[in-house]
Structures are given as structure tokens and as C-alpha cells.
Amino acid sequence: MEDGIIYALISRDSSVLVEHTNSKGNFVNAALQILEKIDAHESNKVSYIYDSFYFHYVSEDGFVYMCMTSDSFKRRIAFAFLEDIKNRFSQKFGSTAKNANRYGLQDGFGSDLRTQMDYYSTSPNADKISKVKVEVEEVKKIMVQNIEKVIDRGQKIDLLVDKAEQLNEDAFTFRRNAVKLKRHMWYKNAKLMVILIIVIIAILYFIIAGICGGLSLKPRCIKN
């Protein structure tokens, strides 16, 4: 599987104005099918999963900025790329893009699209930039659209973490109590051993005293 941004396009409604790809495949048809379902006049940021690939898009003011990536490619970088080409495209063409024909801006923006695709796919700095521009603001906005679908799963994750933490605490407490119990049992056994030795000595003493005729062990066992 190829990593990075594999395919990108900019369309007005469902009419593609410019596109670029570094690969071959039928993903262009898949992108066109997705375009048919998008309301380009509604400001939106969405990701579609398609087999082991993702189609990410930003729609605004009748235009759609879309890219396809592998499922391992960081989404925040993909949306940073889309925001970048959206800004570059708007600055370069402004309102004139609204009158462009199908693929009418391929020559005017194709090289820009290719350059930014390569940059966001390969440059380590692209990830650093995306963290600042997209991670906090944009990705949260994207997730809000799906919050009702993931909120239960989010609660379960929190619950599992809490349980895991509790298990760690319980394990530590168990080990600590086990050490205390072991120490207590050692002292208890030592105490019992001392008492047992004293009892044995006492018993032997009384036996010997009985044989010797008195507690002083005299006169039979100890002679002056």
C-alpha cells in the first residue's frame, strides 16, 4: 500500500476543476461517486473510509477540496493539506473559479496541487505544522459530527482505563499487604518457637527435678 496523499482534486459542485495523482487505479471513480453525495454549498469536513483508504474532504462556498490517503496516514495532516490548497486556490483564482469549466484550472493549479501533495506526504515539517493548525481546532470540529456515534465507545474506553488503574492499585496493595503478612507470620512463628523452647525446657526441668527429689535438684542430682 502506498503511503501519503495518493490523489487530490478540487471541484465546483460535482465538476472537477483540477486533480492530481501519483498512482493508477479506479479511485477516481470512487471520488466522483462521493462528490455526487456532497452538498458543496454546506461548510463541512468529513472522512469516508473505502476499503483500506480514506477520502477526506472540505466543502465550502460551492467548492470541494478532496484527497485520498492510506488508512495509516494521519488525518490531521490530510486536513492540513486540504486547508492549505483551499487557501492557495482561493488566493490564486478568487471568484473567477466559479466560472471555470470542467478541468479548466488543470494547467493553472495542477503543479501547485502536486507540489503540496508531495510536501505533506513526505516532509516531517508537515506533521509539525498540522499539529499547530489542525489537531486542536479542525479535527475536533470533524469529530463533533460523529460524536453521537462514538460517545458510548468513549465512555467504555474511560471505564476500561479506570478499571486498569484500579487493578494496578489493587495489585500494589496486595503486594504490600503480602509483605506485611509475611513479616507478621515470621514474628509470630519466631514467638511460638521461643515459647515452645521455653515449655520444653520447663518440662525437662520438672522431669529432672522429679527424678532428683526436688526443684533444687538436691540431694540426688547435685552434691555439695
Image: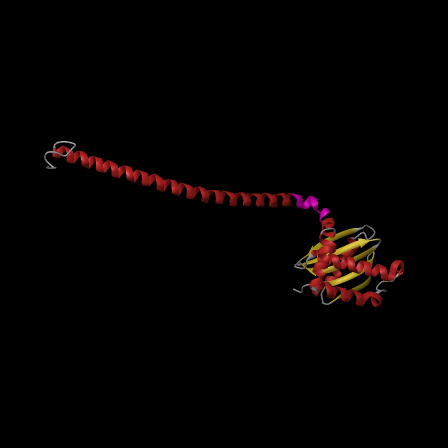
Q: Is the magenta stretch mostly helix, strand or loop?
A: helix
Residue for point 88% across, 59% down: 94
- Quadrant of the rendered image containing residue 183: top left
Question: Which residue shows up at 78% across the image and 59% down it?
Answer: 84
Q: Residue furthest front?
A: 224
Which residue is painted at 35% across and 42% down in the image? 186
**Quadrant of residue 55 within the rendered picture:** bottom right
Give the residues in magenta. 143-151
Q: Residue 224, percent across and down?
A: 10, 37
Percent x, y for residue 191?
A: 32, 38
Instruction: Specify whether 34 is left or right of 61.
Output: left
Q: Is residue 162 magenta?
A: no
201 to 135, vertically: above or below: above
Q: Nearer the viewer, residue 95 or 215?
A: 215
Q: Colour scheme in the image? A: secondary structure
Residue at image coords 76%, 56%: 57
Residue 82 visible in this rendered orientation of the protein: yes
The image shows residue 100 at horizontal and vertical percentages of 88, 61
